[in-house]
Amino acid sequence: MEDSGSVNPKKRRQPAGRKSRQSGRTTSIRVSLEKVLGISTASSSSLTSDPKSGLIAYPAGCVIVLLHPKKNKQSHIINTSRKPFSALAFSHDGKHLVTGESGHMPCVRVWEVDGGQVAEVQSHKYGVSCVAFSTNSCYIVSVGYQHDMTVSVWDWRKGEIIASNKVSSRVSSVSFSQDNSYFVTAGNRHVKFWYLDASKERRVNSTVPLIGRSGLLGDHKNSVFSGVACGRGLVASSTYSITSSGLLCLFNSSRHLEAWVNLKTSAASCLAVTEDFIFCGCADGVIRVFSPSNLQYITTLHHPHRLGVDLTQSVQHSLGARYPDTMAVTFDPAARHLTSVYNDHSVYVWDVNDVKSAWKLYSALYHSSCVWCVEVYPELSDVSQACLPPSSFLTCSSDNTIRLWHTDPPTGHGNLYSNDLQRILYVGENTQAEGEKGGEAAGADGKAGVRVLSISPDGQHLAAGDRCGNLRIFGLEFLDQLVKIEAHDSEVLCLEFSPTSTGMNLLASASRDRLIHIFNLEKNYSLQQTLNDHSASITAVKFSGESPEVRMISCGADKSLYFQSAEQTVEGPWFSRSHHVVEKTTLYDMDLDSSRTHVSVACQDRNVR
């Protein structure tokens, strides 16, 4: 991630950490990614585990996270093409990882697990839905998105596609047989067996059509098959698939759907097959375990956390509790660890050495929807006044939650569910149970969630503005709601407390409704003044100056910057317009420099002014 721009070679050789004479500031050469708090796995095709090292890999946007669950350590692979990863799989020797990405003209890439990219091929148009290594790690199969309609087999060391064909269904899963002779794809009304040996015989020096035979589905020909896995060990000739309606199906060596079992769930989405077990991921946090030889039911694993969990409570068993749906599972046969990802973007690693008394080895709970804002807790001059440990930070999201994180928590500050996450605040009327459903608990206009946060300079209060226009004030000592104000008619876009240097105790909130409200902290956040100069959404508000010469600056989508000057009146401070600047482009964001004498504005035309 070094800057590759044109740099004067005489200036370039400065060692890391050496102070430059011109600036007097320390310059650091490199920013490195330390940790990712989040996951974008949508199905088992984007979750994989390495049987050799115990590493678990999953995508988080344009980054692959390689998690070591026992050590709670992460390493990362970053996609320089800036396309989000959509599918991934480890090779069977654990040395390589294959990834597919989404977006226009996506690549399938092979990475060394502890190094960089070693190969890539571009054979799809719109996105890659699943990838897999052959059991001998020589070949890679990749399946495109539904509109792409291609299945390709690739000799990745030579960098050439050896066989390819069209597929008309949406494919959600792919699995290689143990002897490498075929692989199976599954999807909407589709289970198909593709034969490599037959395809290779017809090959001279070019890509040949891949030979495929449909599974014989009988009465289940209209089912949606959400996962597929070829058998291992004694049942290597069998193939197992799961339907979204909740059936576990067994195909024999002649592609016949020979047997099925009802999983007794409203929906099923994923499966992982080992020599001894089939793990089936179902709705409501259920993972059922069956025997591969005869589909005999063995056990059901523990539920994860319930929706709306309170991290400060140790035990939570309540009647009628709802749990997140299981979306993806992967199994590491060496350590006998099962990793499961749920639809509220939480990750669990279960130790299933004794499958009937499996226990949780690792878990992490992340935001289940778009993250809008990050606020770092300020460093206070009097540490005894701080409500939160140093280097804590808060985030808010469309999932109707505010989360308090600490990447290096002090001892005794942990909880049952996460090392990094300290608290979850559920915001809004439909709090607890709906809190983690990822934006389903929306308002009348379909908008949900908390849009913006701001922490008061004394570190005591947190202000949060939501997408319906409400403003809430929380006390940071106990994270309890102190005040709720129905402030705006539309989503709150920015919140700003006046700095201590201004000598004022004010909070400004601005919204898509074109209004700025100023609240007085000394009068329990009563409304001090409303400003209506802007004619479009307001994107940023800042206070500057020192008492008695205090200013407020605002900018917005009306291409305007307004400067307001404060006067002290009997009722308190009163702002009036002193200056107005109009630009030729929308103003997206604004900040003051450290001396608070200059304003920098980020503009729609890609300039900073």
Image (spheres, rainbow, N blue to C red):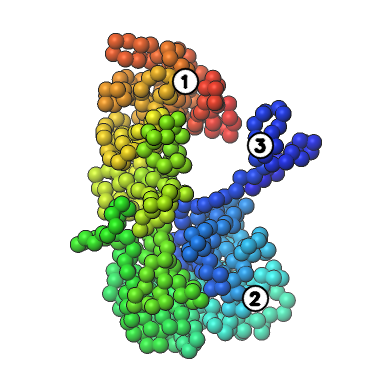
Q: Which residue is mark 1?
A: 544
Q: SS class of the residue under badge 1?
A: strand
* Mark 1 / mark 3, whichever is N-terminal: 3
Q: Residue furthest left?
A: 319
Mark whose residue sits in front, 1 or 2: 1
In this rendering, position of residue 5 left or right of residue 305:
right
Mark whose residue sits in front, 3 or 2: 3
Residue density around tag 1, few if under 14, some if 14–19, many if 20 or more, within 10 Å: many
Quarter of image, res 376: top left
Q: Which residue is mark 3?
A: 27
In this rendering, position of residue 2 left or right of residue 557:
right
Residue density around tag 2, few if under 14, some if 14–19, many if 20 or more, within 10 Å: some
What is the three-letter code of the residue carrying label 1? Ser
Residue 366 can be seen, yes or no: no
Mark whose residue sits in front, 1 or 3: 3
Specify the quadrant that holds the C terminus.
Answer: top right
What is the three-letter code of the residue carrying label 2? Cys
